[in-house]
Image (tube, rainbow, N blue to C red):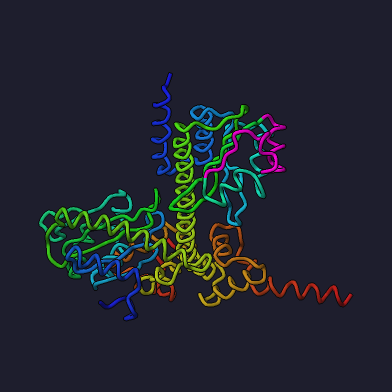
């Protein structure tokens, strides 16, 4: 049975895993949200991240209860997370019953779902607030002074993990694009050779047919080249006869 | 320092120039690889690099190939030492081209190897531990620079700074396509056959490819 301290250490150590290639950030955040419930004396925890347009989206929560998720997601115009995200400061209400005017939509909605107090902590990286950690309690009362720094630490861990994962994802995208483009150049030249040989035409004519087919069918040249090489596309489909064959047929129909 | 085609040195060229001065080299270059095959080069500095890269393509052996496969730096302080068993053909041809010591550092982006930073000297001798450490840092930097440059490329294209190919390489790939049909074999096999023919005939791969493309040469086994 792990002590509280051991649990805290384990959570921070888990951050090192974000550097591993098959790191699953959503799984990590779910685990983090659950840890928040265990360590911070609250009922539910949720993590919201702002997307490119500045809308807060739920990334993970400690439970799948739809009431909790809805409540988290609803904070795009008012609520503790909304304020926290925009101010970059911690926002709390010890007793929502006393704070109904503060958040006229969020407050009653939270009470209806059995939540009496709420704490939002900013997720920050290098001075930017990228989202918020939301803690809900069934009873009134604030998160203790002992636990608040820990809660902020959890929020900061979440921020680092998300940004690390986003940066890895972006790098992978660029690498895939580079390797794909480097390979495509080669495939196109190989396809010219294949078509030149199979149709017994010169390389310039082969290139012209490949380009013409790609254009007529609105396809990428490298895809057409790849399909010719792997046999999905037959050289006869690329001939001028095939191209003009259609117009000959339509002329015939037209004359009937 | 002169860059490829005599243009203003690009950021990639500058990484290679930095490598040359920090590791007291004769030249440095970046080989871009996909699945262990050389598919492009960037930032060439020094005349021997072109030779090293072309030899890797011609012979399918050398420090770039090994560094990519092993995912580790490959260090050869003297290509001319007696009893040189690593890359016998490559070593001989490289020394003739003025490349005496060669060191290759794989470029990693996460778990993917995108290429190799290859550096050489015209005199024998190992890298000392400081130079080796600098080499590793430069390889990291080179990988990041390639990534940053490619991020600015139009969709589905290789950025022009990374798009340098050895001269006449289009013909080699075209010839590969032709041979794959003529012999009824895969692209990889066709390429191996072209290379073997060049080796056996003591001609360059480029020359053999040109002969195939101009229909002056049919390889043995053509149907």
User: Magenta segment: does it hold A256?
Assistant: no
* Count of numbered marks: 0
Q: Residue at x 45, y 55 (%)?
A: A171
Question: Residue B213 or B118: which is nearer the viewer?
Answer: B118
Question: Residue B219 or B65: which is nearer the viewer?
Answer: B65
User: Magenta segment: does it hold A109?
Assistant: yes
Q: Quadrant of the N terminus of chain B?
A: bottom left
Query: Where in the figure is residue B87, as x and y percent of width and height?
Result: 22, 56
* Residue furthest to the bottom: B6
* Residue furthest to the front: A98
Query: Where in the figure is residue A209, as x and y percent of width and height?
Result: 59, 73
The answer to whether residue B165 is above or below residue A113 is: below
Query: Where in the figure is residue A91, as x and y percent of width and height?
Result: 56, 43
Instruction: Please state if A45 lies on the left or on the right of B27 as rendered.
Output: right
Q: Residue at x 43, y 25 (%)?
A: A4
* Residue furthest to the right: A256
* Residue furthest to the left: B82
Q: Residue at x 60, y 55 (%)?
A: A54
Query: Where in the figure is residue A2, as x and y percent of width and height?
Result: 42, 21
Indicate the quadrant where residue B212 lies: bottom left
Give the extent of the magenta segment. Answer: A90-114
Question: Residue A154 or B141: which is nearer the viewer?
Answer: A154
Instruction: Please state if A59 lies on the left or on the right of A216 as rendered.
Output: left
* Residue B171 in view, yes or no: no
């Amino acid at each position: 049975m792990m002590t509280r301290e051991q649990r805290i250490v384990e959570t921070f150590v888990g951050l090192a895993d974000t550097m591993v290639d098959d790191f699953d950030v959503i799984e990590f955040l779910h685990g983090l949200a659950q840890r928040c419930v265990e360590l911070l004396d609250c009922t539910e925890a949720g993590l919201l991240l702002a997307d490119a347009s500045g809308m807060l989206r739920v990334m993970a929560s400690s439970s799948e209860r739809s009431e909790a998720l809805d409540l988290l997601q609803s904070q795009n115009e008012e609520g503790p997370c909304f304020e926290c995200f925009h101010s970059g400061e911690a926002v709390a209400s010890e007793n929502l019953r006393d704070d109904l005017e503060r958040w006229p939509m969020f407050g009653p909605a939270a009470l209806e779902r059995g939540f009496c107090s709420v704490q939002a902590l900013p997720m920050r990286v290098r001075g930017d607030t990228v989202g918020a950690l939301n803690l809900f309690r069934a009873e009134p009362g604030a998160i203790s002074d002992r636990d608040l720094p820990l809660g902020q630490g959890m929020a900061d861990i979440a921020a680092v993990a998300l940004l690390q994962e986003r940066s890895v994802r972006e790098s992978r995208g660029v690498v895939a694009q580079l390797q794909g483009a480097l390979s495509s150049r080669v495939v196109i030249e190989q396809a010219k050779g294949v078509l030149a040989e199979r149709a017994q035409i010169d390389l310039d004519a082969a290139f012209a047919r490949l380009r013409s087919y790609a254009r007529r069918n609105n396809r990428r040249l490298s895809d057409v080249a790849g399909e010719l090489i792997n046999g999905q596309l037959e050289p006869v489909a690329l001939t001028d006869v095939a191209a003009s064959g259609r117009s000959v047929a339509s002329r015939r129909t037209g004359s009937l | 320092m002169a860059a490829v085609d005599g243009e203003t040195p690009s950021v990639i060229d500058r990484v290679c120039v930095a490598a040359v001065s920090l590791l007291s080299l004769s030249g440095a270059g970046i080989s871009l690889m996909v699945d262990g095959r050389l598919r492009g080069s960037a930032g060439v500095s020094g005349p021997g690099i072109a030779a090293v890269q072309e030899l890797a393509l011609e012979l399918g052996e050398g420090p770039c190939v090994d560094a990519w496969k092993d995912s580790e730096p490959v260090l050869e302080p003297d290509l001319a030492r007696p009893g040189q068993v690593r890359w016998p053909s490559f070593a001989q041809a490289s020394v003739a081209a003025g490349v005496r010591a060669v060191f290759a550092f794989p470029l990693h982006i996460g778990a993917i190897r995108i290429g190799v930073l290859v550096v050489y000297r015209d005199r024998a001798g190992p890298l000392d531990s400081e130079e080796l450490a600098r080499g590793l840092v430069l390889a990291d930097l080179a990988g990041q620079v390639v990534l940053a440059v490619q991020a600015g490329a139009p969709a589905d294209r290789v950025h022009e700074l990374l798009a340098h190919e050895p001269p006449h390489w289009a013909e080699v790939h075209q010839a590969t396509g032709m041979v794959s049909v003529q012999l009824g074999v895969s692209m990889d096999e066709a390429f191996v056959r072209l290379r073997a023919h060049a080796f056996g005939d003591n001609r360059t791969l480029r020359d053999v490819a040109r002969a195939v493309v101009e229909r002056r040469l049919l390889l043995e086994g053509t149907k």
